[in-house]
Image (spheres, rainbow, N blue to C red):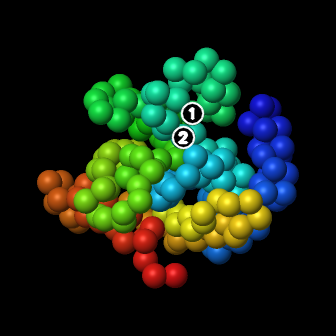
Amino acid sequence: MFYRFARFLLKIVFKIRYKLVIHGNTNLPETPLIICANHINLWDPILLAIIFDRPIRFMAKKELFENKFLGFLLEKFGAFPVDRDNVNIKTIKDAIKLVKDNEVLGIFPEGTRVKTVSEENMKTGVAMIASRAGADVIPVFINSDYKFRSKVEVFVRDKIAISSFDDVSKDMRNKEITKAIYENIYKVN
């Protein structure tokens, strides 16, 4: 209930502040999914939450939960903390379970906001979660400076079917999935 109400209010805020242009399909199938986007601004998770029709559960850096009010809001939105410097097995297992339970997981695969685009910035955790949960990945590219009344352009890419990596050896699978996610997020529009 909170998620829907907050999402409704945030859509209004976004329409006032920005000119939102969406390319691609925002109707998500009712299957296990992971949304992976580049991360350029604190508004990114909110943007993704308002453009997609299914609720998204985000991994968020644990430091955000240290502020009691913000932590409360994040929990109400279904976000859960991750220690980016020391990701533990419980966090990964929780993410896998969430996706297997047919919820949508939102992850920024570079682990933080980045200024310089590079494949080396990509973490393999998304690939591991997708592979173990049998979840397809929807890559998303966000392009904006988020200045007042500026254009916020979102490119929702075609899904990456995790089954297309079934023939890749286990020791190369995470690397190949991560590469595919990177290439699809940052491909020329």
Q: Which mark is residue 113?
A: none
Check disc 2: other Cα within 10 Å, few if <14, some if 14-19, many if 20+.
many
Check disc 1: other Cα within 10 Å, few if <14, some if 14-19, many if 20+.
many
* Residue located 52% across and 29% down the image: 64
* Residue located 49% across and 63% down the image: 139
In the rendered structure, the answer to whether residue 172 lies left or right of residue 71 reads left
Residue nearest the observer in this picture, 5 or 117: 117
Residue 152, percent from left and from top: 67, 66
Q: Amino acid at mark 1?
A: Ala
Residue nearest the observer in this picture, 98 or 155: 155
Q: Amino acid at mark 2?
A: Phe
Residue 42, percent from left and from top: 58, 46
Q: Are marks 1 and 2 in contact (CB under 8 Å)?
A: yes
Residue 105, percent from left and from top: 52, 44
Q: Which mark is residue 58?
A: 2
Helix, strand or loop for disc 2: strand
Residue 174, percent from left and from top: 25, 55
- Residue on which disc 1 sits: 79
Instruction: Identify the image quadrant of residue 182.
Output: bottom left
